[in-house]
Amino acid sequence: MNKTDLVDAIAADCDISKASAQRALESMIDNIVNAVMKGDSVQLVGFGSFGAGERAARTGRNPRTGEEIKIAAVKTVKFTAGKAFKDALNKTSK
């Protein structure tokens, strides 16, 4: 499912226009991104939580030459699935 498919599904489920569904989805995404950028976490009960994390600097290797390279530290996004999400996934896969 891509973003267009998701907008279509939201519009159908909520009986709203596709334009309204797209604005709602984009607003949700923007607000999650802005909150995580500020260092907050976003918890959606039953779905999961989004938060910021850090990956430490490390030494890597160029696969072509074998030469060691330094990989800088970076900020990352972490998503942890909620219990209800995990339970739903495991229930349907059995």
Image (tube, rainbow, N blue to C red):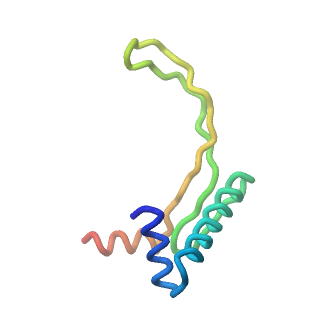
Q: Eyeballing the image, is 86 above or below 54?
A: below
- Location of residue 43 in the rendering, given as x and y in whole percent from the top left corner: 62, 67
Q: Residue at x 52, y 74 (%)?
A: 46
* Residue at position x 32%, y 75% in the image: 91
Residue 38 rendering spot, x and y as whole percentages: 75, 53
Is residue 62 shown left or right of residue 75? Answer: left
Question: Residue pushed farthest bottom?
Answer: 15
Q: Residue furthest left?
A: 94
Number of marks present in the image shown: 0
In the image, 17 versus 47, the foreground residue is: 17
Q: Percent position (x, y) of residue 78?
A: 56, 52
The residue shown at (52%, 59%) is 80
Which of the pair 72/18 is nearer the observer? Answer: 18
**Would you identify the image quadrant in which residue 50 lies?**
bottom right
| Residue 64: quadrant of the picture | top left
Write down the quadrant of residue 72 in the picture.
Answer: top right
* Image height of 72 relative to 77, above or below: above
Query: Can you give x and y, in whole percent of width and height, for residue 90 in the image?
Result: 33, 70
* Nearer-the-camera pick, 45 or 33: 33
Quarter of the image with the N terminus in it: bottom left
Left or right: residue 24 compared with residue 38 = left
Report the quarter where the C terminus lies.
bottom left
Seen at 60% across and 29% down, the residue is 57
